[in-house]
Image (cartoon, rainbow, N blue to C red):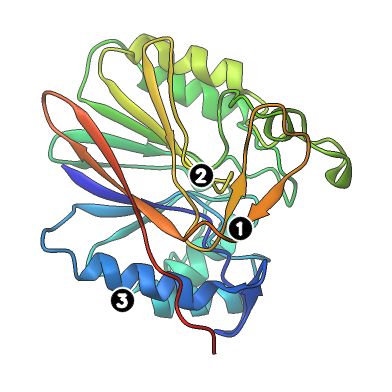
Amino acid sequence: MRFIHISDTHLGKTPDFTYNGFNSYRHLERVIETINALPFAVDFVLHSGDVTEYGSAEEYVLARRLLERSRFPVKYAVGNHDNAALLQSALLGIESPSGRYDHTFSVAGVQIVILDTNNGFVPNGTLTERQLADLRALCTPEGAPLIVALHHPPLPLDTPWLQEGWAGFGFRSMLLNEGEAFRAAIAPARERLRGVFFGHIHRAFQVQHEGIFYCSAPSTVIQFVAYPEQRDPKPAPEELPAFALVTLDEAQLTVRQYALPRPEAG
């Protein structure tokens, strides 16, 4: 099984919207064109959240027109810049949206679970008690190979501004509030859990924690610096937009990152 992991596209209401100085629509357009031109097929594209910047219906209509160009199906997590109801209705055409957009599907015998960790338009994420209970019921020792995806990082990442927040945003963490409970819920499935994938931080991280592999995707627009001991977020405009290719077979899981040249301004 193979999938593409993208994240944090931050599309606006119009194709000329700029995010941190860059046209997010044209950047995602280039990513989609690149993925469509790959000389092999993937099973799906995982978008781990922040599809839009403000979570409006107009943004999701624009996102739908662009993301429908993908020759592979796109699966979505809800980010803190997203609106779960509008993502479901305006982007995916779901007539009766659920309050939280959790969903599960299977590919080549692998079960993929995507959790909605939206906590409103704030950096930190959350899971409800019901979601944690469902996750505990799912993550038994026996079963099919499993992948879990969400928007917010569920564990520390050796960067103070990610873990503790910063003054400009009220010292709110970028992490999942219930990270410890999340990790306890998935622990029984350690032997069949192939990886936990997330976004939100505009930076590719790979972490091995208590025998479980965690991996974030870079942004398709702009990366953020995340050094040890760094107290404030800082954009890295010199770093290119990127996506990850994830390959899973019986023997191993492989993650490769691909950076793309920025589209020309104009």
Q: In which quarter of the image is residue 233?
A: top right
| Location of mark 1 (residue) | 82
User: At x 53% / y 21%, what residue is drawn?
Assistant: 182
Mark 3 or mark 1, which has the lower sequence index?
A: 3
Mark 3 or mark 2, which has the lower sequence index?
A: 3
Q: Quadrant of residue 173?
A: top right
User: Label 2: few (<14), some or many (≥20) within 10 Å?
Assistant: many
Q: How far apart are marks 3 and 1 (CA)?
A: 21 Å
| Nearer to us: label 3 or label 2 | 2
- x then y, percent, for residue 152: 57, 38
Q: Are marks 3 and 2 in contact (CB under 8 Å)?
A: no
| Nearer to us: label 3 or label 1 | 3
- x then y, percent, for residue 128: 62, 30
- x then y, percent, for residue 185: 48, 16
In the displayed structure, would residue 106 be above or below residue 186? below
| Location of mark 2 (residue) | 199
**Left or right of 43 in this view: 146:** right
Q: What residue type is labelled 1?
A: Asp
Q: Distance between the residues labelled 3 and 2?
A: 22 Å
| Location of mark 3 (residue) | 69
Q: Do the residues labelled 1 and 2 touch (CB within 8 Å)?
A: no
